[in-house]
């Protein structure tokens, strides 16, 4: 592993919605860094819809990234709050009685950041995601701002993505959250719709699409130096 100079870099991965493939792409991102010799880690604040097994609750997203990227981390260190209910974290936490405390998220994030030169934090669902909504109100954007993160947006390459990406970009811009790039998942080379979506998204949003991910890709097709540029101090 390549060791840094005491300044860890970080990025937040969000998506245009649920089931876009955010975790799949996140795993490829972390894997790319680690395969190129960088000390890269992963963190997620809240995960709902976790698998329930005879050995307990398994945080699927964190487990998947840990396995694919070969982080070899104790999975309990990768996510702060794990809920079994397959609903938004705010509702899952109400059902299960374990609401998110932003102080714990900050503490756990900083612990992870201290161990890695490049930390990739994955969000929950799309960008408009209530994390807690009772006597305290925490939206996903509040965590992003609290941690001082820039974002990478994961979107589908297919029909409807122009609208979804533009709305996500505008939401982030209106809240002063930096966007370092867009990655399109489920891309098919030569597909006329997909190629036009690339052109239209970049034209309308003025945000660069930095990588394209095809079905079942095992590697992220991006120059390692370009990927490193996505991370901020």
Image: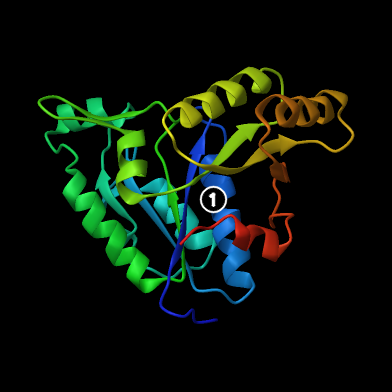
In the rendered image, is residue 18 in sight? no
Instruction: Reply above or below: 211 against 3.
Output: above
Residue denoted by label 1? 26
For the point 46% across and 71% down, which residue is it? 117
Number of numbered discs visible in the structure rendering? 1
Residues 143 and 40: in front is 143
The quadrant holding residue 101 is: top left
In this picture, residue 138 sits left or right of residue 35: left
- The colour scheme used here is rainbow
Question: Secondary structure under badge 1?
Answer: helix
Looking at the image, which residue is at 82% across and 25% down?
Answer: 196
Q: Quadrant of the C terminus?
A: bottom left
Residue 81 visible in this rendered orientation of the protein? yes
* In this picture, residue 146 sits left or right of residue 95: right
**Is residue 134 placed above or below 215 in the rendered structure?**
above
Bin the neighbour count of mark 1 within 10 Å (Cα to Cα): few under 14, some 14-19, many 20 and up: many
Q: Residue at x 74, y 54 (%)?
A: 221
In the rendered image, residue 14, in percent from the top left (x then y), is placed at 49, 39
Give how far across and how far down residue 23 sits, in percent.
51, 45
Q: Position of residue 164 (x, y in %)?
A: 59, 21
Q: x%, y% of residue 48?
A: 32, 36
Instruction: Give above or below for 191 relative to 79.
Output: above
76 to 5, vertically: above or below: above
Residue displayed at 28% across by 66% down: 111
Q: Quadrant of the N terminus?
A: bottom right
């Amino acid at each position: 592993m390549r060791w840094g100079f005491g300044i860890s870099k970080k990025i937040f991965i969000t998506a245009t919605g649920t089931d876009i493939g955010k975790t799949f792409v996140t795993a490829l991102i972390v894997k790319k860094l680690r395969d190129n010799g960088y000390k890269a880690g992963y963190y997620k604040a809240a995960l709902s819809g976790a698998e329930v097994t005879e050995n307990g609750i398994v945080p699927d997203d964190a487990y998947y990234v840990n396995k694919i990227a070969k982080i070899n981390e104790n999975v309990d260190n990768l996510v702060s709050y794990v809920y079994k209910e397959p609903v938004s974290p705010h509702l899952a936490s109400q059902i299960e009685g374990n609401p998110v405390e932003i102080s714990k998220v900050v503490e756990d994030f900083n612990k992870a950041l201290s161990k890695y030169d490049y930390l990739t934090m994955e969000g929950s669902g799309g960008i408009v995601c209530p994390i807690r909504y009772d006597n305290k109100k925490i939206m996903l954007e509040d965590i992003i701002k609290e941690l001082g993160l820039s974002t990478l947006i994961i979107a589908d390459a297919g029909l409807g993505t122009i609208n979804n990406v533009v709305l996500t970009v505008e939401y982030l811009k209106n809240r002063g959250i930096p966007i370092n790039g867009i990655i399109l998942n489920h891309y098919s080379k030569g597909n006329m719709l997909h190629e036009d979506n690339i052109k239209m998204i970049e034209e309308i949003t003025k945000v660069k699409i930095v990588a394209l991910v095809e079905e079942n890709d095992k590697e992220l097709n991006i120059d390692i130096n370009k990927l490193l540029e996505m991370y901020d101090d």
